[in-house]
């Protein structure tokens, strides 16, 4: 990644991380409802600015720029199409697009695709609300992480690592997403956010809340992600690897066809 892309991605990640973890570090005098409500607004502004800057940088890269933006548009449309049928518990087939594209094209591409595709799918499925900016960050993180997984070596290693990653982020996505609403949905219950308690106590509250409300739901996403990678990962990655080579977007050694 270039320096400009690094700055944009890091800025979006820092803003997104703070928007999720503020309950564990917020002073007791802050109003949780107000902070959570305001958070979705400013995180959307920062995220859209960073993603827009990334797309602007791609458009300024000569012949490769428009192709990269067009590819993000095509893959984002695929995410919309796969999200339209709905969810099976916490599972949506749109995650396979983010996983394979992030792995094929790299972390910055995966981050941008995750944010853009989630925003577009939110519009088409009527998923507009204060949760959307947080979904954009969380799905973008899925694509970002996939870009750091190995591309070299043998196919079984690459598919296995991506499948394991898809399984883990199936739970991680749910755990992260619940953070945006937990401070005010759980209320003053024994598993709710307590502004007078410290970070360790609130972490225990949240862990209990997550296990009770979302762990089983997220298991469908984790298993679904891993299964799709095992079944469809190799042919999809072969196609995207060829596109990456033609567009000079490769980020490391590519698995040999015969491996």
Image: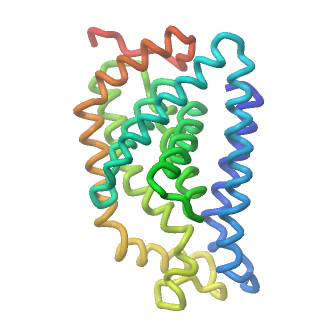
Question: Camera-side residue: 83 or 167?
Answer: 83
As drawn, 240 above or below 93: above
Q: Residue at x 36, y 38 (%)?
A: 96
Image quadrant where residue 90 sits:
bottom left
* Spot occupied by residue 92 in the image (x, y as percentages of width and height): 34, 49
As drawn, 228 above or below 23: above
State left or right for residue 82 relative to residue 10.
left
* Spot occupied by residue 210 in the image (x, y as percentages of width and height): 41, 72
State left or right for residue 107 relative to residue 42.
left
As drawn, 254 above or below 5: above
User: Which quarter of the rendered picture does the N terminus lie within?
Assistant: top right
Image quadrant where residue 25 sits:
bottom right
Image quadrant where residue 64 sits:
top right
State left or right for residue 29 relative to residue 128.
right
Q: Residue at x 71, y 83 (%)?
A: 31
Give the colouring mode of the picture. Answer: rainbow
User: Which quarter of the rendered picture does the C terminus lie within?
Assistant: top left
* Spot occupied by residue 204 in the image (x, y as percentages of width and height): 48, 77
Q: Residue at x 66, y 88 (%)?
A: 196
As drawn, 192 above or below 147: below
Question: Camera-side residue: 15 or 259?
Answer: 15
The mark tally for this picture is 0
Q: Residue at x 70, y 62 (%)?
A: 41
* Spot occupied by residue 217 in the image (x, y as percentages of width and height): 31, 64
């Amino acid at each position: 990644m270039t320096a400009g892309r690094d700055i944009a991605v890091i800025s979006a990640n820092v803003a997104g991380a703070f928007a999720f973890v503020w309950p564990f570090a917020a002073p007791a005098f802050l109003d949780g409802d107000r902070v959570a409500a305001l958070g979705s607004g400013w995180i959307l502004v920062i995220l859209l600015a960073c993603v827009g800057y990334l797309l602007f940088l791609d458009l300024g890269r000569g012949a490769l720029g428009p192709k990269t933006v067009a590819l993000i548009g095509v893959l984002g449309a695929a995410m919309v199409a796969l999200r339209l049928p709905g969810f099976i518990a916490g599972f949506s087939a749109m995650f396979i697009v983010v996983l394979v594209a992030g792995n094929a094209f790299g972390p910055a591409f995966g981050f941008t695709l995750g944010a853009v595709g989630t925003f577009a799918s939110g519009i088409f499925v009527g998923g507009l609300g204060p949760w959307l900016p947080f979904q954009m960050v969380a799905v973008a993180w899925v694509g970002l992480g996939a870009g750091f997984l190995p591309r070299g070596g043998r196919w079984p290693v690459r598919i296995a690592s991506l499948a394991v990653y898809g399984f883990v982020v199936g739970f991680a996505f749910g755990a992260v997403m619940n953070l945006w609403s937990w401070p005010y949905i759980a209320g003053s219950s024994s598993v709710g956010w307590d502004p007078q308690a410290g970070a360790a106590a609130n972490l225990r509250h949240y862990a209990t809340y997550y296990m009770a409300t979302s762990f089983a739901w997220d298991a469908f996403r984790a298993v679904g992600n891993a299964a799709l990678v095992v079944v469809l990962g190799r042919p999809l990655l072969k196609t995207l690897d060829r596109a990456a080579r033609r567009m000079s977007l490769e980020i490391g050694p590519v698995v040999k066809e015969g491996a």
